[in-house]
Image (spheres, rainbow, N blue to C red):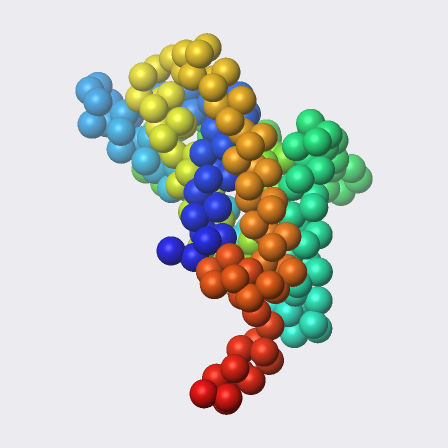
Amino acid sequence: MNALLAGAVVLGVAGSAHCIGMCGPIALAVPSPGAGWRARLSSTLLLNLGRITTYALIGVAFGTFGRGAQLAGLQQWVSILAGSVLLASVIIPGLLERWSPTGRLSLMVGRLRSVLGRNLKRTAPEALFLTGALNGLLPCGLVYGAALGATAMGTAQEGALFMIFFGLGTWPALIGLRMSGHMVGTKSRALLRKASPILISGMAVLLILRGLELGIPMVSPAPVAMQEASIGCH
């Protein structure tokens, strides 16, 4: 597996405590469409599939931007910047959360929350999927950080894949939360919070190394021109 994709999963796991606080109340507020664990599991999977679909679309957008940067010869700097921002978010807790939408964007977020609120009690499959998709659009510092990682991937497809792997990393905590019907234990959340800065720092370092192009296979590949020259020599 590509090191950055593995890092995306780690980033999702690292942010699980944050996800429980942000997305957990929404997951718990959506009623199960029927009695029994099967109905609850199917609704839980639909909610999370909707959320990951939104993440994938975000990945397409940011991956496309990264592709443009790559064509302009700026890809390595985008990767270094993304890693630096993630590292700064560990050093300055809450850095990515300090940005809040204003103007028209703020109005759009307000409408989004209104639509989400009206949709919460609906249990039809399409409604559950839509609730998850809308949830994925809500402002979230963790998603902002993941989107930076998607930019460093360099293509729309890889950007989408990065965000999908990131979303899958959040699944164990959120699926476990909804299936159990209560918040994850205090000890587990404390452990996740302690591990989170370390794991996010690891992802940040990986992005910076990728941008430095040190010629380390899977972690910091050499520039394409250098790789082609090496192949030509052989």
Q: Position of residue 227 (x, y in %)?
A: 53, 78
Residue at the spot 52% in from the left edge and 35% down from the top edge: 199
Q: Is residue 57 above or below residue 35?
A: below
Seen at 43% across and 17% down, the residue is 188
Q: Residue furthest right?
A: 103
In depth, the one of 141 and 103 nearer the eye is: 141
Please, is residue 220 above or below residue 193 in the view?
below
130 relative position to 59: left or right: left
Task: Using the image, determine if residue 8 lies above or below residue 119.
Answer: below
Quadrant of the rendering where the C terminus is positioned: bottom left
**Residue at the front extreme of this rendering:** 234
**Residue 32 image-quadrant placement:** top left
Residue 200 is at least partly visible in this image: yes
Is 34 left or right of 114, judged from the image as shown? Answer: left
In the displayed structure, does residue 232 sit left or right of residue 96?
Answer: left
Residue 129 at x, y = what percent?
39, 39
Question: Where the N terminus falls, by quadrant?
Answer: bottom left
Residue 68 placement (x, y as % from top left) = 65, 69
- Tell me the quarter of the picture where residue 174 sits: top left
Above or below — where is 202 with respect to 59?
A: above
Query: Total label count?
Result: 0
Q: Does residue 54 show up?
A: no
Residue pictured at 23% horizontal, 27% vertical: 39
Name the residue nearer the viewer: 56 or 220.
220
Whole-percent x, y for residue 191 in the image: 47, 19
